[in-house]
Amino acid sequence: MNLAIETENLAKRYGDVTAVEHLSLRVAEGEIYAFLGLNGAGKTTTIRMLLGMIKPTAGCAHVLGTRVRLGRREPWASVGYLVELPHCYPELTVRENLEVARRLHPGTPSQAVSRFIERLGLAEYADRRAGTLSQGNAQRLGLAKALLHEPRLLLLDEPANGLDPAGIVEIRALLLELTRERGVTVFMSSHILAEVARLAQRIGIIHAGRLLQELDVAELERKRQRRLLVRARDMEAAHRVLTAAGQPAGILPDGTIELRNTAAVAHPDDIASLLVGAGVPPTQLMVEEEELEQYFLRLVGSSGGAK
Amino acid sequence: MKDLSNMIWIELRKAFRSRMPLFTTVGSLFMPLGIAFLIFVATHPEISGRLGLVGAKANLMAYAATNWPTYLALLAQMIAAGGFFLFCLIICWVFGREFADGTLKDLLAVPVQRASILLAKFSVAGVWSVALTLVIFGVGLVMGAIIGLPQGSPGALLQGSALVAITACLTIAVVMPFAFFASVGRGYLLPIGIAILALMMANLVGVLGWGAYFPWAVPGLFAQGKGYVTPISYPIALLTGLAGMIGTYLWWKYADQSR
């Protein structure tokens, strides 16, 4: 497996404050890897270390096979990035900002500017000063700058920031297309967990500078908690029937009966039969899957609580 | 070389699209126009009498500059003081804006040598400062001719021009460290604060007699043309500029950039 990103015990400390600690990541080429964490968890510091903007206190990082060092030219010809807010030169037009980005990546054809203006839906604003753009369009400009030289690796910090729902769908489609058709690797941090769940193949969860867990989408499916929610006209009787049948049934604040055991979740029809047989037919049976958001908060909470 | 020309294109585009060329040109025009006005007032007692404080100031300052050699020396002194601030402003803007606008990060992980990016910035700031010097000098010559200054022999004009040119070069050299201060301070405030402090210190050390060894006093003392500087003053000013450029390079290359 070729690795696009590899870090070994990467750490960054500012005096007594530890921003990132013992971070060992492996991101395969062609993969979409999402980096999840609360504000201040160490996501941006990690991305800056991967880009050689910040020197690690300990450990090392390799990007596209090259060891990252401050002030080097390699391997940036093949890396596109968007770190934190998408800043640009406000007095230059959108087109001029992209021309600046093109010249910072020698060898990028001049037609790329017009192509990415079209691709990112910026044609209407091409000759407008970038300082007048809305947050969403500034984000599109930031993404266009990252994509302009057709990199093999994209490091994107909150790529959906400021985009409207249509923009989010558009960028998702673009990233998926780049990954599938051109084998581009995407390493992205995001707060929009539903978006991550739709896009990423692997997810890394970072909290207080430490990588808590790395899992792929299949693993996430397995680890997500599921529960069967039951409602009946006579909730007390239904609860008695289920408990008598050996089902560890809990009651939620709104009175709904909650069953978490695997058998009940896998076969809600058995529970329905049981209740019908006991003369307490269910009015509602629903299998609910834990969202990534809940999973994330549960994981972060169990590691010391969200700050 | 291709990288450098690309970086110069970028810096020029950023500069020309901003309002800074306009502001600095207007600022530079105040110097020759102001001196010419004071000389004009000083040489016309019927006007200076009516202008009160301005007339008194004109009489105090500009009587001495009623011929070409002293007029050009006054212009050189203006460049050493007012030009210093303008050149400082330019270099602070060229470097500090990347931090203030948050665009620095777009210059860091790119396949272009950091040295090329910085050399382009220093070159554009330098050429811009030279252009302002030419504006000040050119407008100064025109104004001198309009108010009809005497003793405008070719020799005197050549000597005055050399004084202005060397003063401008020394001033440009001593503003180079402000690129470093703008980078360390991540914006404009620190370098502008240090520029004010440097000019105050230059006056103080000048009074104490150590001005020839204080880089930011050297252009002003040289412009006075009375042997205030010593042969060591020139390398001190030039090495200060070089140290500023090297310091800026090392800062951009090795310091953590978290903005």
Image: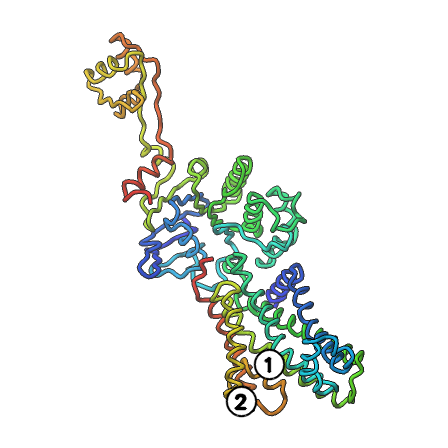
Residue A21 in picture, x, y percent from top left = 32, 54
Residue A117 in picture, x, y percent from top left = 63, 46
Q: Along the polypeptide, which appears first: circle 2 or circle 1?
A: 1
- Whether residue B249 is situated above or below residue B17 in the rendered picture: below
Q: How is the image coloured?
A: rainbow
Which residue is located at x 33 percent, y 33 percent? A224
Given residues B90 and A215, the one toward you in this image is B90
In three-dimensional space, the C-alpha distance between marks 2 and 1, rounded to whole angstroms, equals 13 Å
Residue B95 in picture, x, y percent from top left = 55, 65
Given residues B170 and B114, the one toward you in this image is B170
- Whether residue A284 is situated above or below residue A183 in the rendered picture: above
| Chain under numbered label 1 | B
| Quarter of the image that includes the C terminus of chain A | top left
- Whether residue B212 is situated above or below residue B240 in the rendered picture: below
Is disc 1 placed on a helix, strand or loop? Answer: helix
Residue B191 in picture, x, y percent from top left = 52, 69
Given residues A175 and B247, the one toward you in this image is B247
Image-quadrant location for residue B75 = bottom right
Which residue is located at x 54 percent, y 81 percent? B203
In this rendering, would A120 be left or right of A27?
right
| Chain under numbered label 2 | B
Counting other residues with Cα less than 10 Å from the Cα at mark 1, is it few (<14), some (14-19), or many (20 or more)?
Answer: many
Q: Which residue is mark 2?
A: B232
Q: Which residue is mark 1?
A: B170
Which residue is located at x 59 percent, y 82 percent? B219
Is disc 2 placed on a helix, strand or loop? Answer: loop
What amino acid type should be assigned to the residue bearing mark 1?
Leu
In this rendering, would B41 be left or right of B78?
right
Counting other residues with Cα less than 10 Å from the Cα at mark 2, is it few (<14), some (14-19), or many (20 or more)?
Answer: few
Q: Are marks 2 and 1 in contact (CB under 8 Å)?
A: no
Q: Is residue B134 visible?
A: no
What amino acid type should be assigned to the residue bearing mark 2?
Ile
